[in-house]
Image: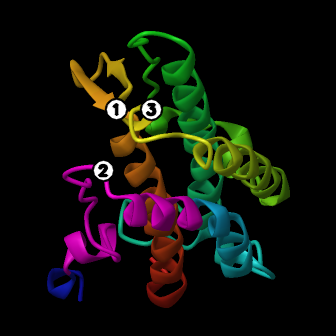
Amino acid sequence: MLADIDIEKLKYPSGKFVAMASFDEKEVKKHIHALEILPAYLAETVKGLSPEQLLHKYRPDGWNIKQIVHHVADSHLNFHIRLRLTLAEETPTVKPYDENVWAKFPDANNNNLTPSLYILQGVHARAVDLLGTLKEKDYQREYFHPEYNKKFNLLWLLGLYAWHGKHHTEQIKVALQHKF
């Protein structure tokens, strides 16, 4: 059975991230809206899941549902900090972190998803408010990511995190379907 499974499809059920080639106000608003609705979308997806269901994985050797939810909160906290640093400083260097190590921490394996869902709700409300005030030139501001030895602009960051939340929510749906 496992030989017939397309691991890439399980990893990326909504497709891989594709960055905007250039500033497009309509796309920016679409991405901001995706950030705005993510907390409710994710909360609805995991609502009422049993402790057993929280252990389901979206693919063999992947994270389980509770690790995914806690990861999204961790990652989107980093998104918010990177956004603010990039607006406040000239090409700041951001701090990388090992998400696989973080996924093993006890709090990332807690059945209580509520704190992470609250984090997402608050972080996204703040980020959406701030992003809505930015002008095209603001989205060109950059930060440096030492893990990739590369600069990224806020337009890229916005697109990535609009995709990221949906990406992981879709993985949860796959986990509930396949129950790895």
Q: Decide which of 78, 5 is in the foreground and name it.
A: 78
Instruction: Give the Cα separation between the discs numbered 1 and 3.
Output: 5 Å
Picture residue at 39% right of the left edge, 53% below the top: 159
Q: Position of residue 32 (x, y in %)?
A: 55, 59
Amino acid type at image mark 1: Gln
Work out which quarter of the rendered image holds the N terminus and state it. Answer: bottom left
- For residue 26, say whether it is visible: yes
Q: Which quadrant of the structure image shows residue 174?
A: bottom left
User: Are the two marked residues, 2 and 1, in contact with CB atoms closer than 8 angstroms?
Assistant: yes
Q: Which residues are magenta?
A: 6-34
User: Are the two marked residues, 1 and 3, in contact with CB atoms closer than 8 angstroms?
Assistant: yes
- The numbered dot on residue 12 is none
- The numbered dot on residue 23 is 2
User: Are the two marked residues, 3 and 2, in contact with CB atoms closer than 8 angstroms?
Assistant: no
- The numbered dot on residue 138 is 3
Q: Position of residue 158 (x, y in %)?
A: 44, 48
Amino acid type at image mark 2: Phe
In the figure, is residue 160 to the left or right of 49? left
Amino acid type at image mark 3: Asp
Label 2 element class: loop
Q: Is residue 45 above or below residue 164?
A: below
Residue identified by numbered label 1: 140
